[in-house]
Amino acid sequence: MGFKLSFLVLIVSHLLFLCSNAIIVDRNKAYSEREALLSFKDSLENLHLLSSWNSSTPYCNWVGVSCQHGRVDSLALPALSLKGPLSPSVFSLRSLTFLDLTSNLFHGEIPPLISGLKRLKKLLLGDNQFIGEIPSQLSELTQLQTLVLGHNSFSGKIPPELGSLPQLITLDLAGNALTGKIPPHIGNMSKLLFLDLSSNLLSGSLPLPLFTNLHALSSLDISNNSFSGTIPPEIRNMKNLSDLYIGYNHFSGQLPREIGDLSRLQNFFAQSCFITGPLPQELSNLQSLSRLDLSYNPLKCSIPKSFGKLQNLSILILASSELSGSIPPELGNCKNLRTLMLSFNALSDSLPEELSELPVLTFSAEMNQLSGPLPSWLGRWNQLESLLLGSNLFSGEIPPEIGNCSLLRDLHLSNNLLTGPIPKELCNALSLMEIDLAMNFLTGNIDYTFLKCANLTQLILVDNQIVGHIPEYLSKLPLMVLDLDSNNFTGTIPITIWNSNNLMEFSAANNQLGGYLPEEIGNAAALERLVLSNNRFFGTIPKGVGNLTNLSVLNLNSNSLEGTIPTELGMCTALTTLDLGNNFLHGSIPQNLAELGQLQCLVLSHNNLSGSIPSKALYFRQVDIPDLSFVQHRGVFDLSYNMLSGTIPEELGNCVVVVDLLLSNNMLSGEIPRSLSRLTNLTTLDLSGNFLTGSIPPEFGDLRRLQGLYMGNNRLSGTIPSERLGHLSSLVKLNLTNNKLSGSVPTSFGNLKGLSHLDLSYNELNGELPSSLSSLLNLVGLYVQQNKLSGKVDQLFSNSMAWRIETMNFSNNAFDGELPVSLGNLSYLTYLDFHSNMFQGGIPMELGNLMQLQYLDVSRNRLSGQIPEKICGLVNLFFLSLAENSLEGPVPTSGICLKLSNSSVAGNKNLCGTIMGFDCKSNSFEKSALLSSWGRLAAVVVGSIVIVLFLAIALARHVTRNKRQTVAEEAEESKLNSFLDQNLYFLSSSRSKEPLSINLAVFEQHLLKLTLVDILQATNNFCKTNIIGDGGFGTVYKATLPDGKLAAVKKLSEAKTQGQREFIAEMETLGKVKHHNLVPLLGYCSIGEEKLLVYEYMSGRSTTSGDVYSFGVILLELVTGKEPTGPDFKEIEGGNLVGWVFQKMEKGQAADVLDPTILNADSKQMMLQVLKIAFICLSENPANRPTMLQVLKFLKGLKNDH
């Protein structure tokens, strides 16, 4: 018994010992978890945010802490702004299954010790600031179901070890800086439902296991990376996919047909890739599809009619996808379609009425070629909020039924062909906030039109034909933007307009508004942009404008304002643009204008301002300006055409933002400050027309962006800086006329390859003109008259075949030697003045080749010999002076020589003829005539022999190559051969073997040896198998030139050609037009009535779109009365006719480009409509241009309207 009792005591003691040990162990574990949590808290940089974590409260009750069976199993602290590294103490919480630290400020790397959380099922660390690589040790958390590491700054590659997480359902690595490819191991996560790898730097093609193994995947987001390749057909295996986001990548090729097998797909976004069409018809199988976005892809196809089968489609976005064709009526079957965005394509025809029953909220089809009247059924869209139809070809009046769209907020119909008055019924849509009707042909007044638009915040009516006064009720509307530019508004601006508390932008330029500007302007405290240029305002600028402290742009250019510039403008500290040019302002420039730190554009030109330029220059220094500052013409500093005096301040060299520094035509004196060389953004420097002295600063050679340098009409002296100015590789125009410059013309000027105008006239330059100038192939004007230059000029024209120079003036120098025969190669030359030099020898008959020549003066030289009759036959020549030479023989009696005045040939004592007052009957003349006759006879004989040989060769080729040609083709070749003039002969020069009687002009140097024989051979005698296009203006043949290069030869229809002179003039003009959207014209050939054009060969639709573009240029010529190129167009004004017109239209000044010689009230509307059609033909993207058939339709529509 005692033994049993002793044994029982022993057992109880042992149990008590075990229990006490268990209690101690549990207390130790509890103690370690508490310490781990406190250690985590202590590691925070803002630990006060967890102040509730203290010893007075059990740790299982602390904020974010949850326990199970006395152990911490959940730590959830999202969105608390906690900051610090991730403490390793967290990883000692071995029972943790849930860890959520999203949306905090944790930083640093994730420690590899995280692998100790073996029971963890959800790890949420997204939206923090973690860096480094994603630790591969995460693969040891085999119970993990959710891993969210998105929106941090992780870098490196995705660890392939993550593929060993078999339980993972959600993987979010979005918004990091991960690189490399997607490891194929990701395909091992067979339970994965959500995969988000978007917004990283991942690249390469997608691994096939991603598609073959992840059958359970519901959502896949890989957007905003750099993935490439095609979408594989294996995508059909993702049967459970409901969301697919692959946009903003480099995917290319067509979408696979198998994508139609994803029957559960609801959202498909593939925007901004390189996906091409046609779109697979199988897309219509996606009956669950709700949102589809394929915008910004080069689809180049039509919208599939089968899209009408997508009954659940609510959003369809196909903007900027190079779509063509019409909008399919079948889309009207998509009864749930609420958003339809088709902007920036080439869609045509009218809007189908089948769309009228859709529950549309947003309809956008801007920048297309949609035409016809705006349909009245638009008023049936009673849920419509945004209607965006700008930049199309809609015509007719605005339907008042649009006002039935009671929820409509945004109405954009700008840049169409709309006519008539604006219907006041629009304001029945009481929710209207934005109305943009700019660039149409709207008429009438707006006296009551917008009276009921009580919520209107933006009204844009730019470039219409609206008349009447600006109504006072506009001041009662909550308008933030009121833009009335380029209309016919008259009267004064209602004074109540200036009492608006909302108005931020008010523009009424290019109207006929007048009256005084009131002091009340200062009441419009919210105003940021005020533009009233090109009106009839008079009086002074009110001082109250100084109250507009938010004002960024003030433009009062081209009015009749007088008085001084108010110093109060210096209080407008937000000013970025101040334009007071073309008024009658006087007095000095207020010094405090130079203290406007944000000023980026200052125009005070064409006034009567006096005094000095402010020297304390704080403006034009701020490189970064607010995005909403409305700054215009950034970097323009224009004080030209005033009466400013004194020196140019050195401080201007600190105005680093200046792009155009224009100080011309003032009374500035002193030397040019070298500090201006610090203006590294400078593209135009105009100091001409002042009293500046000293030398040209050689430091100007550092202005590498300079395009225009004008320092003429000053008192500059010294030599032209030789080497430094030769570094100005961007220079286009250099004008140093009328100074006192001496020395030679720098050889380094030959490095200025882009130079188009060089004016060194009226100086004291000496020596020879450097032959290096012959390399200036873009030179249009060369002026060196009234200097002391000497020597021969033949080397200067050694490269004349490639020159496109139009004006040359070498007069009043000491040039000698003979006039170069190569002058006859300057086919673009219109003005040639060599008078008052010492040239000798005969007048080259080759000058008679200058078909464009209008002005020729070689008087007061030492020229001898006879007057070439060929020169007299130049049809464009209106001035010819040969006076004061030693010419002899008869004065020709043809062309301009028949109308010459006596003074034009005076001083040539051996000339004879009616104009000289006596006949030419001397034996010497008879002998010369006889020799000439024998010469002509010999030429005919030789020419006939050559022609016989040529015809024999052509006939042999014809018989050999064309036995099977049709009778019509034989007649065609016979017709071509018949055009060969019997007086045909060839040049003996090795440079060209072109028949003289065939006028062939070539604009590319490498085709200079192209002959008619080459064209016949290249087209296989215009064989019909080489036809690649046929239209109203002729047939286009594919040609293979002797060097193997492909070309396109257009043989114009006889009915479409004009006379020889007009054709040559037009071709010379078109040859000058260079544009990346215009198929280059390489040359032309005129053979009697036959006209041939040689184009660069371009495959596909480009050749046709090039014709449309060319036709657009012709339309511009018609409505503007200007040629496509020429000195009228400055570089800053577009450089050519197309660029100039586009700039004017963008500024809302379309009416300014119309030809004033034919413009009147009756013609204005039609001319503007033709201008709009030309605008469409000249679209930047060839795919957006209409076909010639559509252009014909537009023009016929104009004819019917008028």
Image (cartoon, grey):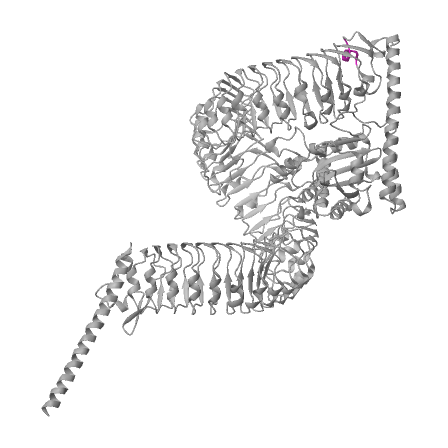
Residue 659 image position (x, y, % from top left): 52, 31
* Vertical placement of residue 1129 versus 165, above or below: above
The percent position of residue 706, horizontal first and vertical second, equals 54, 29
| Residue farthest to the left, as pictured | 2
Counting labels gives 0
Check residue 119 for magenta coloring. Answer: no
Q: Quadrant of the C terminus?
A: top right
Residue at position x 28%, y 61% in the image: 89
**Residue 59 higher or lower than 605, as above or below:** below
Q: Quadrant of residue 445?
A: top right
Write down the quadrant of residue 666 in the picture: top right
> Could one spot residue 438 in this view of the protein?
yes
Camera-nearest residue between 621 and 373: 621
**What stretch of residues is rendered in magenta?**
901-906
Is 157 situated left or right of 1172 in this image? left
Quadrant placement of the N terminus: bottom left
Q: Is residue 334 above or below residue 757?
A: below
| Magenta stretch: includes residue 902 | yes
Q: Quadrant of residue 512?
A: top right
Residue 1162 appears in view: no
Q: Is residue 995 left or right of residue 828?
A: right
Q: Position of residue 807 (x, y in %)?
A: 68, 23
Give 58 or 867, whichever is nearer the viewer.
867
Residue 1111 horizontal/vertical position (percent): 73, 40
Which of the two residues, 334 or 65, is positioned nearer the viewer here? 65
